[in-house]
Amino acid sequence: MQLCALFISAQRGGPEHSGNCSTLPRMELDTRNMCAPGPPTWIAPPAKPTTEALIRAKLTEYRNKCRERDRLILEAKQGGLTEVAIAELSGHSRNTVRSVLRNHGVS
């Protein structure tokens, strides 16, 4: 995005400024960063996601967390921890731990 710029350089006379026009501030237009001629181009702000899109994103994130949960429970069981120990350490109920192990064919 290119921004338009107008630089003004002023060369002022001292306190003894007279009515002479040659001592008035001099303005120069810096054309190095000028925009193309024509009306300005406005860029709309990004659209806010819909409620449905937000819910879908949250549910997808939750599904990914559940996959991680299942992987950790299986890893803990293979590491020799009991279902009760896994439940206590993970904060899940023993029924959840049993269900995960059963769903993955581990008893």
Image: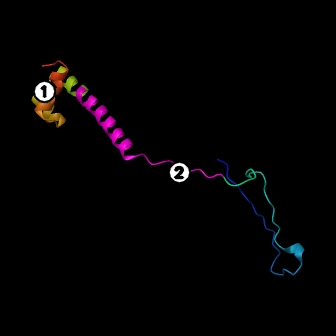
Instruction: Identify the image quadrant of residue 14.
Output: bottom right
Q: Is residue 53 above or below residue 33?
A: above
Q: Decide if residue 87 is on the left or right side of residue 53.
A: left
State the extent of the magenta-drawn residues as a range.
41-70
Question: Looking at numbered disc 2 in the image, what kind of residue is underneath it?
Answer: Pro
Residue 79 appears in view: no
State the image coordinates of residue 60 (x, y, percent, origin top left).
Answer: 33, 35
- Which residue position is annotated with label 2? 45
Q: Nearer the viewer, residue 92 or 62?
A: 62
Sequence order check, earlier mark of 2 and 1 = 2
- Judged from the image, the secondary structure of the residue bearing numbered disc 2 is loop
Q: Is residue 22 above or below residue 93?
A: below
Whether residue 56 is in magenta: the answer is yes
Instruction: Identify the image quadrant of residue 29.
Output: bottom right
Q: Decide if residue 69 is on the left or right side of residue 61.
A: left
| Cβ–Cβ under 8 Å for marks 2 and 1 | no
Badge count: 2
Residue at coordinates 34% horizontally, 39% vertically from top-left?
Answer: 56
State the image coordinates of residue 57 (x, y, percent, origin top left).
Answer: 36, 39
Residue 1 appears in view: yes
Residue at coordinates 16% horizontally, 23% vertically from top-left?
Answer: 101
- Judged from the image, the secondary structure of the residue bearing numbered disc 1 is helix
- Which residue position is annotated with label 1? 98
